[in-house]
Image (cartoon, rainbow, N blue to C red):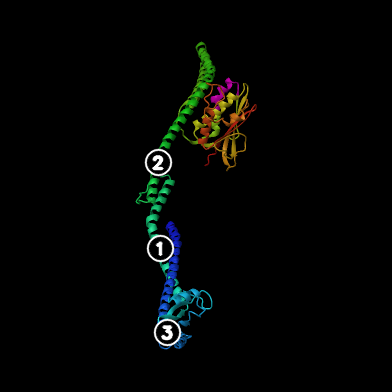
């Protein structure tokens, strides 16, 4: 309705201009008609006077003609009548005197002097076959003010009637032809903005609005097809991403296998030795059996941890304790760390860190960071794992560089800091540290996916990673996960 009202208001000035122009032209036409009628009437009157004066001239002479002219020029008469002598009357222009002497009637409007605007009609007076003078009948210009007022009133009334009619017709036709289709398009757009890509409008018109409706429907068809492709691509991406994560877990399992085998060697030797003692000395059977059970449980626990880490499971986010998840990673990696003579030092400033997370994925992210730190550490070094509470500003989903992220609203979170004291990284390497397949290790020693997968996992949990490194002074990766609210 607002659009049709705007259309009506846009058309209204043009209509008013047309009406005003028509009124102006009508006034000009009426003035021209008045002048033509006045000229014609004055010429007829002047001709009648000239004929009468010609007969008087022939019967009574010039003196009676002049006396008759003086009587005709009454002060209160509509016309002003005077006698013109072509030979001696200097008030008549030269061209008119020549035309009058030839017997040609003349008419003109006074342009200057006392009687500006008066209409003059001069007719020749003939007596005895020759022109003896002329009769000048002059009349003041007509008073058109009353006519102008009537025309203005009529124009105003016509304008008001035209305005009302035009507004009503424009609103009615606009609502029917423009308003309804646009309302349908607005409703369709609102449905689309709400996520309904199947919203369609029926194009009932064969004009631009109908074409717009058809084009919008075609666009929605393409969007719906594109959305289906995006959904399929997203599913494929999730599948591929999960496969990459599983492959990285298997890579880590393979890296841990030799260390686990070495770790299992000690309890196996104990089991074998105690079993021999049982055979040789039946008196301490209970003691030897208890030790065998303890060592077997120790081996079972190590193997179960390794299998749980390697097993593929769909992501399942629920209430978890980040302190327990972080602490649970240490035993799994202790053998790898001891093989490289690197100490894993875990310290938690909080006893419990409630988060909403998938435990396997979070442990994989922490494992990737700690394994990376172990590999970066020198023999005899240490890796510190620190769990803290944090009130931090999200630095985008991933941030690598010095502290001081872009300002944003602070959130309550927990942070797990993994720090090594190795060679560190240059600024160029640090800028690319989270890129998939980027690695500085020799071919075959790393897939280049560990930190990238850790980044993706943390991002999917609503957190972010902050990385800092300095050549010669080691690296520090800090994982931030939002605190679970009750």
Residue at 39%, 64% (x, y): give it. Answer: 165
Tag count: 3
Q: Is residue 13 left or right of residue 423?
A: left
> Where is residue 388 drawn, in percent x and y?
59, 35
Mark 2 highlights which residue?
222
* CA distance for labels 1 and 3: 62 Å
Secondary element type, mark 1 = helix
Asked if 57 appears above or below 37 in the picture, the reply is below
Count neighbours of disc 2 (C-alpha within 10 A) and say few if under 14, some if 14 to 19, many if 20 or more.
few
Q: Mainly helix, strand or loop, the magenta region?
A: helix
Count neighbours of disc 3 (C-alpha within 10 A) and say few if under 14, some if 14 to 19, many if 20 or more.
many
Mark 3 highlights which residue?
53
Q: Nearer the viewer, residue 314 or 16?
A: 16
Foreground tag (1 vs 3) = 3
Lower position in the chain sequence, tag 2 or tag 1: 1
Lower position in the chain sequence, tag 1 or tag 3: 3
Asked if 199 appears above or below 130 in the picture, the reply is above
> Where is residue 71 drawn, in percent x and y?
46, 87
Foreground tag (2 vs 1) = 1
Q: Nearer the viewer, residue 308 or 90?
A: 90
415 drawn magenta:
no
């Amino acid at each position: 309705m607002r659009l049709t009202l705007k259309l009506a208001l846009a058309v209204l000035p043009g209509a008013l201009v047309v009406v005003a122009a028509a009124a102006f032209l009508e006034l000009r036409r009426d003035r021209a008609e008045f002048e033509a009628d006045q000229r014609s009437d004055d010429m007829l009157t002047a001709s009648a006077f000239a004929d009468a004066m010609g007969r008087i001239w022939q019967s009574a002479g010039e003196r009676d003609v002049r006396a008759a002219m003086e009587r005709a020029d009454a002060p209160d008469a509509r016309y002003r009548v005077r006698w013109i002598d072509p030979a001696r009357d200097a008030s008549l222009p030269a061209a008119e005197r020549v035309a009058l002497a030839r017997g040609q009637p003349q008419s003109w409007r006074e342009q200057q002097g006392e009687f500006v605007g008066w209409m003059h009609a001069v007719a020749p007076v003939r007596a005895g076959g020759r022109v003896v003078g002329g009769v000048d009948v002059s009349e003041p210009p007509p008073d058109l003010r009353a006519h102008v007022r009537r025309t203005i009133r009529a124009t105003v009334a016509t304008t008001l009637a035209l305005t009302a009619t035009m507004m009503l017709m424009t609103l009615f036709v606009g609502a029917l032809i423009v308003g309804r289709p646009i309302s349908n398009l607005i409703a369709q757009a609102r449905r689309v903005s709400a996520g309904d890509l199947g919203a369609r409008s029926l194009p009932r018109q064969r004009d631009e609005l109908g074409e717009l409706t058809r084009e919008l429907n075609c666009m929605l068809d393409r969007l719906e097809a594109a959305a289906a492709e995006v959904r399929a691509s997203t599913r494929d991406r999730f599948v591929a991403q999960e496969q990459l994560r599983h492959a990285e877990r298997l890579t880590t399992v393979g890296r841990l296998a030799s260390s686990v085998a070495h770790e299992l060697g000690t309890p196996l030797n104990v089991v074998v030795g105690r079993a021999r003692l049982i055979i040789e000395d039946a008196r301490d059977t209970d003691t030897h059996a208890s030790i065998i059970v303890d060592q077997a449980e120790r081996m079972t626990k190590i193997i179960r941890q390794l299998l749980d880490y390697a097993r593929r499971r769909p992501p399942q986010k629920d209430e978890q304790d980040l302190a327990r998840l972080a602490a649970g990673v240490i035993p799994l990696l202790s053998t790898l760390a001891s093989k490289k003579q690197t100490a894993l030092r875990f310290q938690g400033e909080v006893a419990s860190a409630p988060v909403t997370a998938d435990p396997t994925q979070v442990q994989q992210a922490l494992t990737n960071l700690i394994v990376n730190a172990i590999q970066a550490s020198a023999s005899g070094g240490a890796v510190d794992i620190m769990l803290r509470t944090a009130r931090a500003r999200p630095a985008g989903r991933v941030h690598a560089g010095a502290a001081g992220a872009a300002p944003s609203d602070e959130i309550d979170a927990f942070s797990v800091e993994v720090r090594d004291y190795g060679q560190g990284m240059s600024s160029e390497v640090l800028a690319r540290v989270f890129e998939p397949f980027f690695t500085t290790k020799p071919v075959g020693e790393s897939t280049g996916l560990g930190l990238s997968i850790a980044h993706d996992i943390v991002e999917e949990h609503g957190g972010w990673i902050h990385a800092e490194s300095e050549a010669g002074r080691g690296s520090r990766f800090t994982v931030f996960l939002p605190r679970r609210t009750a």
